[in-house]
């Protein structure tokens, strides 16, 4: 097999690749997730026009592909880079690449809470693989830089439902840092702890509380107050929670003040402020809160309307997980209003979004909802079929499986009772009352 040092690195007529093209080609291996002329110019410290010409030349040699101004690096370049770039030079390039990405993240973060958030979110999404690589490299070689990247991505990650990704990155970084908080990066460290705790990893929660107590000024990252309230607010003394919110009221940032209103259960005021700022995510959170309050007050028509408004924003942001959750909740509300066709439509749409988001729990809830809609509509055979499918698709390896199994069994009991089969209904109720492990061991 031809070596990567020679394969594809000549012109169409077999002429040797010019030295500058070889040098640039070797250095492009530092971009795992594609590149633009601007990013290469910044990392390699070249004039933008020169960079564009070089990238076009490499594209003509079939070493890069290009679409809408974004280049993808082919395997031959990565192999060539591995042969030609020393580890010391590779680390220098990765450091410069990470610094370039940090600058992008900082600029984007300032815009992600305003009317231009969709464009900036797209810019970050295009760099997702590069950012993962940069965080992984910085976690091992430059923890301060890694902390700043993780902190800077906080709004983007949570806005797009990437809480687990944030948690994994934060947990790895905290594992390297340990309990030592780098000087001047206390809030960045706090955000890393909040990410880890938000995805189910509670290590460092007490340390987070201490950091918050020591930070007497308003947070520098507007999103910190929201994540603090969501993740740790319910688990700290009420006095501390109130004090944290009171400090943020000294902020001059409009989004921060809107977030304080939301955290202080003033969702109506928060919604108005987020709409003035032009932030879809904050507006979505406020609408969702208002919808749940309305549902709790049995104002189902208003709850349906508010949930629908939140769903429109979730679709604009492209957050499938949040959209699936909202659709399922609206289906439940419509079911209570006996709007059966509309409820069934919401549940079917939930199934599509749940699959896109990888949320087996929401898919199970939607199937159970469809079974209820069929039962309420008098189609008991279809209801039983749907409930049995829901039960059969409750895997053992996700947290909500036990609850979904219990709800599916309870629905099967309700279907049997509606069909005039009391003994079968009693049997399903007994199974629903068993611990899930007992039910599984009994062969379902």
Image (spheres, rainbow, N blue to C red):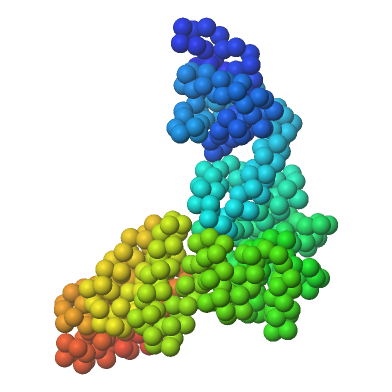
Residue 298 picture location, percent across and down: 39, 87
Q: Is residue 47 visible?
A: yes
Judge left or right: residue 214 versus residue 428. right
Residue 95 picture location, percent across and down: 71, 38
Query: Is residue 141 depicted above or below 59 in this figure?
Result: below
Q: Is residue 444 visible?
A: no
Picture quadrant where residue 201 is located: bottom right
Position of the C terminus by quadrant: bottom left
Query: Is residue 212 depicted above or below 122 in this figure?
Result: below
Picture quadrant where residue 53 is located: top right
Between 70 and 231, the one lying in front of the other is: 70
Residue 89 picture location, percent across and down: 72, 29
Residue name at image x 73 percent, y 48 percent: 145
Between 277 and 212, the one lying in front of the other is: 277
Residue name at image x 74 percent, y 73 percent: 247
What count of labels does the image hold?
0
User: Residue lying furthest right in this view?
Assistant: 183
Between 55 and 177, the one lying in front of the other is: 55
Between 145 and 439, the one lying in front of the other is: 145
Residue name at image x 60 percent, y 72 percent: 230
Picture quadrant where residue 262 is located: bottom right
Judge left or right: residue 207 versus residue 41. right
Judge left or right: residue 262 versus residue 442. right
Residue 29 picture location, percent across and down: 60, 30
């Amino acid at each position: 097999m031809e070596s990567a040092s020679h394969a594809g690195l000549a012109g169409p007529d077999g002429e040797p690749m010019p030295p500058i093209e070889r040098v640039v080609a070797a250095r492009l291996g530092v971009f795992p997730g594609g590149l633009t002329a601007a990013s290469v110019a910044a990392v390699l410290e070249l004039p933008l026009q020169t960079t564009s010409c070089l990238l076009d030349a490499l594209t003509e040699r079939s070493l890069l592909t290009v679409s809408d101004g974004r280049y993808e690096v082919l395997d031959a370049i990565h192999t060539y880079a591995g042969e030609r770039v020393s580890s010391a030079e590779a680390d220098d390039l990765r450091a410069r690449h990470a610094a370039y990405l940090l600058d992008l993240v900082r600029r984007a973060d300032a815009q992600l809470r305003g009317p231009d958030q969709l464009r900036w979110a797209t810019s970050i999404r295009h760099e997702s693989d590069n950012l993962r690589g940069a965080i992984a490299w910085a976690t091992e070689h430059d923890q301060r830089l890694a902390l700043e990247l993780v902190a800077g991505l906080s709004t983007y990650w949570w806005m797009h439902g990437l809480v687990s990704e944030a948690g994994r990155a934060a947990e790895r970084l905290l594992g390297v840092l340990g309990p030592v908080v780098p000087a001047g990066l206390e809030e960045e460290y706090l955000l890393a702890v909040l990410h880890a705790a938000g995805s189910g990893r509670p290590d460092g929660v007490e340390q987070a509380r201490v950091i918050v107590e020591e930070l007497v000024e308003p947070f520098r990252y507007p999103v910190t107050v929201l994540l603090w309230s969501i993740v740790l607010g319910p688990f700290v003394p009420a006095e501390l929670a109130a004090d944290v919110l009171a400090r943020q009221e000294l902020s001059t940032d409009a989004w921060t003040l809107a977030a304080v209103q939301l955290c202080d259960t003033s969702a109506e005021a928060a919604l108005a402020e987020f709409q003035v700022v032009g932030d879809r995510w904050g507006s979505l959170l406020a609408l969702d809160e208002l919808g749940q309050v309305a549902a709790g007050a049995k104002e189902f028509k208003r709850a349906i309307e508010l949930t629908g408004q939140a769903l429109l924003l979730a679709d604009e942001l492209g957050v499938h997980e949040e959209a699936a959750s909202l659709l399922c909740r609206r289906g439940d509300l419509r079911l209570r209003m006996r709007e059966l066709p509309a409820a069934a439509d919401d549940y079917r749409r939930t199934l599509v979004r749940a699959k896109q988001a990888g949320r087996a729990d929401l898919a199970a809830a939607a199937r159970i909802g469809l079974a209820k809609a069929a039962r309420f509509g008098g189609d008991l055979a279809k209801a039983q079929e749907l409930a049995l499918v829901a039960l059969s698709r409750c895997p053992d390896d996700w947290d909500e499986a036990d609850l979904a199994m219990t709800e599916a069994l309870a629905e099967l009991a309700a279907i049997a009772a509606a069909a005039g089969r009391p003994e079968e209904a009693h049997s399903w109720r007994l199974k629903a009352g068993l611990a899930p492990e007992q039910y599984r061991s009994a062969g379902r």
